[in-house]
Amino acid sequence: MQTFNTDKNQTNIIPLFAIGTFGLHLLTLLLLMFHGGMLQQVKRKSVPQTLVQLEDGRVITADAKSSWERNQQTIRRFVGETMTLMFTWSEKQSSTVVWDISSDLLRNDFKREFAQKFNNFELESPEQNVLVIQRISQPEIIADGKWKVELLAHRLIFSRGDNLGRSVPFNKQILVETKDEITSLPRFSTPLNLAAYRLGEARMQIYNICDLEDKSCSENKSVIGNGEQRK
């Protein structure tokens, strides 16, 4: 008789245990869903998104970034295309014209230094110069909104009567930084004006160019054009 009662009690406990376990699992699931919803709300608040309209009319959503943040590929593309633009010229489009238009991609206090550094390039190749890039390194962070990129390239110099040309190594450290404004297009724009403007849309500028061996390339270039230190 006692054995029968014990078995009966155990039989009654099993359904209660199953119901309790199910209820606990359900409560845990609800808590996880609640926490997941809270995390999504926090993410949306801490990383706001913005609508970006593409040239083809499509609109996408993108995470907002601080004004001094840039994607690594954006930095490498800016450096590569800017240097190609600045060091490629011909008889119809002289280096003087190219540098005058593309100088908007240089920081104001570096423009004169740039002209002094590379003035001999115009004398070496007055007719045609083409920059052929072989490698652009991953950007190295110097400070907020400032990066160093190593560029390995060759200048192909063609003079009158020399169709083969000659190749000169052009291996440099390129220092770039963000900027706030874009130089507007002139009223009557040339393809070169448009190319420089498109590059300027990245809101970046070059503030120093040094040889690869120069260990102090970035030491004396930490001041922004208006004389303020970036914090």
Image (cartoon, rainbow, N blue to C red):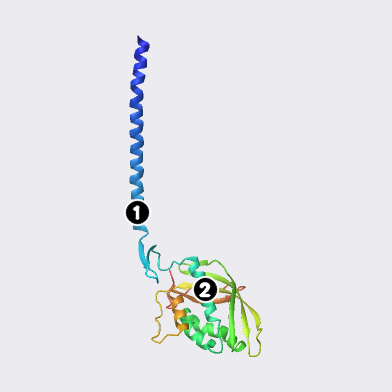
Name the residue carrying label 1. Answer: 42
At horizontal 33% and vertical 41% (from top left) the residue drawn is 30
Eyeballing the image, is 173 above or below 162? above
Q: Is residue 162 left or right of residue 115?
A: right
Q: Nearer the viewer, residue 18 or 153?
A: 18
Name the residue carrying label 2. Answer: 79
Q: Residue furthest top?
A: 1
Quadrant of the rendered image containing residue 179: bottom left
For the N terminus, the quadrant is top left
Q: Is residue 200 left or right of residue 122?
A: left
Eyeballing the image, is 159 above or below 132? below
For the C terminus, the quadrant is bottom left
Looking at the rendered structure, the kind of residue marked 2 is Val
Looking at the rendered structure, the kind of residue marked 1 is Val
At horizontal 37% and vertical 55% (from top left) the residue drawn is 43
What is the x, y in percent for residue 116? 55, 85
What is the x, y in percent for residue 134? 60, 72
Quadrant of the rendered image containing residue 227: bottom left
What is the x, y in percent for residue 103? 48, 82
At horizontal 50% and vertical 76% (from top left) the residue drawn is 206
Q: Nearer the viewer, residue 224 or 147?
A: 147
Residue 220 in sight from this viewpoint: no
Element assignment for label 2:
helix
Eyeballing the image, is 7 above or below 190? above
